[in-house]
Amino acid sequence: MSSATQAAEPVARSAPSIAGLTRLAQRDMEGVDALIRNRMQSPVSVIPALAEHLIGGSAKRLRPLLTIAAARLAGARDDACLNLAAAVEFIHTATLLHDDVIDSSELRRGKVAAHLIWGAPASVLVGDFLFARSFELMVEAGSMPALEILARASRVIAEGEVLQLTRAHDLDLPQETYLEIIGAKTAELFAAASEAGAVSAGAPAATCAALRRFGRNLGLAFQLVDDALDYSGASETLGKNPGDDFREGKATLPLLLAIARTGEAEKAFWERTIDRREQTEADFERARLLVSGCGALDSTLALAEDYAADAKAALAGFEGADGWKAALVELADFAVWRRM
Amino acid sequence: MSSATQAAEPVARSAPSIAGLTRLAQRDMEGVDALIRNRMQSPVSVIPALAEHLIGGSAKRLRPLLTIAAARLAGARDDACLNLAAAVEFIHTATLLHDDVIDSSELRRGKVAAHLIWGAPASVLVGDFLFARSFELMVEAGSMPALEILARASRVIAEGEVLQLTRAHDLDLPQETYLEIIGAKTAELFAAASEAGAVSAGAPAATCAALRRFGRNLGLAFQLVDDALDYSGASETLGKNPGDDFREGKATLPLLLAIARTGEAEKAFWERTIDRREQTEADFERARLLVSGCGALDSTLALAEDYAADAKAALAGFEGADGWKAALVELADFAVWRRM
């Protein structure tokens, strides 16, 4: 966060951040970064150009950080986790590329979406390239159990995306189906990133399961906060335009709760803007007020806090391990603190 | 082929076919088919519906046949090759789904293309699902070297597709670049399908290399004949519309040769129809006559025959192995015989 914000808000001195984790993982993440840059190369020049646009810049690299932290916390002594961390980032980037084509998104990671520069076909195919590269990286890491975890995660993500696609504009989407969707399309990769790190360290099954649970709950918390920020954040924080979900008519939890709570009074508004997606410029501002006014934002964030607490509880059995445990606990706090 | 054709054309009695190979591989391919049907299932119902449309029906399953034949010829005693064969078909189907979205094709395997029924987003995502499933199948097969071969192949295919995308309408595309493109987007999977079968059988390196060489040359022959058929075939043989490549302005070898050979006389025609893609209904018929009249079709088919001969030469060192060798030799003959 900027120093200007710190000055205006003294409490922010104790605000959770990922700075500690980033510092601890610095040497490992330099290795991951080198791997990422090396493996996005190709003699076909569009591929590194497009990949650089999306991966090269300001990406937080949260998922690979999670793989590294889980591996080190679980006692990893070698560097197999670096390959897995790079593979996880490639899987994530591949899904972003395909998502942006499907949603016709305009911004990603604070930049113009790749398909608007290179076209949708190149985005689809470079996504396929990165996905294949991720499996090449996993093969190099040499752990069949880690491969199994990440192959399954990739499949579950695709299932979650299709489920979201088919239910996207459903105003009556049950909360459980929404949680199933974000569990598959987001939390599964967090879970797998964490579990694969532990597995590659040769950790016992209970340790791997605990780190999987940490990752899954962290992922759910992150996605819930993301969905809330779409109604409350600014583009700079999001790296994408606030209101994108609303304009796409995406049935996220803040919207579903607002639809349920505002009842008959706003039924016509939601049917027009979400069901039929007939929207004017002013509609997002009205939606933002409704979502916030009925407490849907607060409820979404409260649920995110529950998942973050569950994530931290999953780490109860771990020793300090050179600060890795504390760094992961702070990551869970950071996940829900980002609301601001 | 139909008995009507046989009656009209006595020489056809000795025409090569894949019937012998299909018979030899019948039990294995029933297992592959069961795996394919089992692994295209998902609780998200669009996925099996779309997959069934594309995989369930009349697909020739050439690539999985190749994996089975290579494995058995190399001495495979167990059934690991069945998983790899199903994985190969899933990779192939995933690329077809993405290709059809990118090319906006209307027909595939004799049916309406999936994206016209379920939409492009579902096609992209079900492609991702099948791709991930293929890696789950490979993990089950348990051979890290086979995984390496198929992960690399998946990456090379994506590179070939991007290369094709960026050079697609280039009237001056050198023949070597065209061969590089079909080498990557088609022949690489034939090569990998064959090599992975041999590797999973625990065959020595020279055997694996020979079967890789067989697959690669077979793939090149198949693609060249496909590209020729687009100017000479009927929809029933192709399972897609003849003229698709021409209408998409795709720089395939028959077209490249025709452009070079018809020279200044037709320059304006090619620039209009391929460069600018301004086409009328009658243009394809004229292109067909030009491609055939200047000998571009014959040259393309002659090159395909060279590759088929190379494929057969790669099998020189093999014993009969219960008919597998003869079946693969006939497959190479069949690849170039399909012209009719």
Image: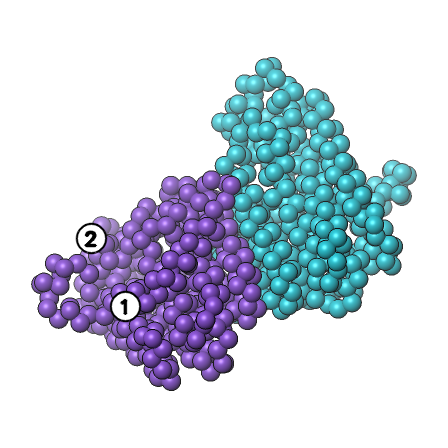
Chain colours: A cyan, B purple
For the residue pair B39 and A173, the one nearer the viewer reads as B39
Classed neighbour count for the residue bearing mark 1: other residues with Cα under 10 Å, few (<14), some (14–19), many (≥20): some
Residue A208 place in picture, x, y as percent: 73, 54
Q: Position of residue A51 (x, y in %)?
A: 59, 59
Q: Residue at x 28, y 54 (%)?
A: B239
Instruction: Locate residue B256, reporting x and y percent.
Output: 31, 68
> On the image, numbered disc 1 is attached to which residue?
B20
Label number found at residue B282: 2
Instruction: Assess disc 2: are there few (<14), some (14-19) or many (≥20) residues with their C-alpha within 10 Å of its C-alpha.
Output: few
Q: Circle 2 marks a residue in which chain?
A: B
Query: Given the image, what chain letter belongs to the residue carrying mark 1?
Result: B
Q: Are marks 2 and 1 on the same chain?
A: yes
- Residue A154 is situated, as x and y percent measured from the top left of the image, at 58, 52
Residue drawn at point x = 48 percent, y = 51 percent: B39
Q: Amino acid at mark 2?
A: Ala
Determine whether, in the image, residue B160 is placed left or right of residue A1: left
